Amino acid sequence: MHPIRKKRLTIVLFLLVGVSVAVGLTTYALRQNINLFYDPSQIADGEAPVDVRIRAGGMVEDGSVLRDPESLKVEFKVTDFSSSVLVEYTGILPDLFAEGQGVVAMGRLDKNGRFVADQVLAKHDENYMPPEVNEALEKAAGKRAAMSGAESDAAASY
Amino acid sequence: MWQIFHKLGSPKWFFGIAATLMPWLLWVGVAMLAAGIGWGLAFAPQDYLQGNSYRIIFIHVPAAFLAQSVYIMMAVAGLVTLVWRMKLADVFVKAVAPVGAILTFLALFTGAVWGKPTWGTWWIWDARLTSMLILLFLYFGVIALGAAISDEKSSARAVAVLVLVGVVNIPIIKYSVEWWNTLHQPATFKLTEKPSMPPEMWVPLLLSVLGLYLVFGWLACLRMQTEILLREGRTRWVKELIQARGS
């Protein structure tokens, strides 16, 4: 390669490395701000501020959804399978909201560790499948559970 | 090898090659795109969770995929501009930047339309959506900077530097869903693993992505030809070409 081109290439590479390092350090320093929500573990560890509008996200714990028959009030637990946080919400839930599904709730954490949400968004994962496949999978899972004599009511509750 | 590379830099040579390639790119691309989108929208099975609303994926993913690929191609062309001072590389950047901007907008728009029924919101400032919005602004910046400097050479270099600086955003878009907590789900397609959807969903998706690539190739050739004619209007070969067409 021509020496002058080599020189230009070096300068461009330095520019790229420099910009990458700068952006990398900035995003690393801002990582908690870039995170859309706090995990239940972070909330349990006291990392999340109390009485400040924040988002909490995780999976809706199986069997934790309690609906008030008189109003639109709902209570459920959001878990990351090591800790969980109790969420209280009044309003219409998105269609994809279900036990075992991911959610992101926006609201405030009160002093007792309850999360009072004013908006609940559903999070879905990257897996797509036809309904028949899902039914077959669930049936197979139910059979296995029944055969091993373990509680099959988790699968039957669907 | 270097000879081919330098020959590629000749606008006249490229003009001829583009003319032979273009019909193939267009018709094969349109056929694949139509097959992929038609199959995806009408015949692919529903999703067990999202029902029919997931079908917008057959437009959303190709647009988002191309939006990022086009930027990477522009960055490679920017590198060529800066190091080898090849005019054709700058022609490419100027020609495809508006196409990239439109694809990015399409990805954001279809994402919003998809987000409303599934997540419950049109927009959220999570890392994936925000970095994609930054990509749109980068495209706007490239277009504006290119148009603002009238001197061809300084415009080419300034745009190349901007394109290269902006390329750091691409890995951020790609890995945003892994590095941070986001509302957007992680990638369904991974290089090392099987896609997390059945073939009757991913085959039409792949078809529409490849089809859009080819249609983009056609559009890039067409816009580059126009740009070359504008820039080289005074050279002999362009005058001869115009005379040959006019008679």
Image (cartoon, helix red, strand yellow):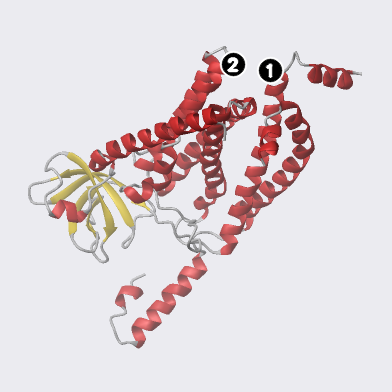
Q: Tell me the quarter of the picture where residue B167 sits.
A: top left
Residue B201 visible, this orientation: yes
Relative to B151, say whether B33 is above or below.
below
- Amino acid under disc 1: Arg
Determine whether, in the image, residue B199 is placed left or right of residue B177: right
Q: The C terminus of chain A is located in which quarter?
A: bottom left
Q: Secondary structure at mark 2?
A: helix
Binning the other alpha carbons within 10 Å of mark 2 as few (below 14), some (14 to 19) or many (20 upward) gives few
Amino acid type of disc 2?
A: Glu
Percent of width and height locating residue B106 = 53, 36
Q: Is residue B106 above or below residue B114?
A: above
Q: Earlier in the sequence, mark 1 or mark 2?
A: 2
The location of residue A11, given as percent across then percent down, is 44, 30
How many numbered circles does the render carry?
2
Residue beneath disc 2: B152
Name the chain under label 1: B
**Residue drawn at (34%, 59%) of the image:** A101
Number of other residues with Cα within 10 Å of mark 1, as a class: few under 14, some 14 to 19, many 20 or more: some
User: Is there CB contact under 8 Å for labels 1 and 2?
Assistant: yes
Q: Give the side of residue A58 with respect to residue A3, left or right.
A: left
Q: Which residue is mark 1?
A: B231
* Residue B194 point in image, percent of width and height: 50, 64
- Residue farthest to the right? B247
Distance between the alpha carbons at the discs numbered 1 and 2: 9 Å
The spot of residue B30 in percent (x, y) is 71, 44
Residue B102 in view of the camera: no
Element marked by disc 1: helix
Q: Quadrant of the N terminus of chain A?
A: top right
Tell me: residue B21, above or below residue A95.
above
In screen coordinates, is B9 left or right of B178?
Answer: right
For this rendering, which residue is in front, B219 or B196?
B219
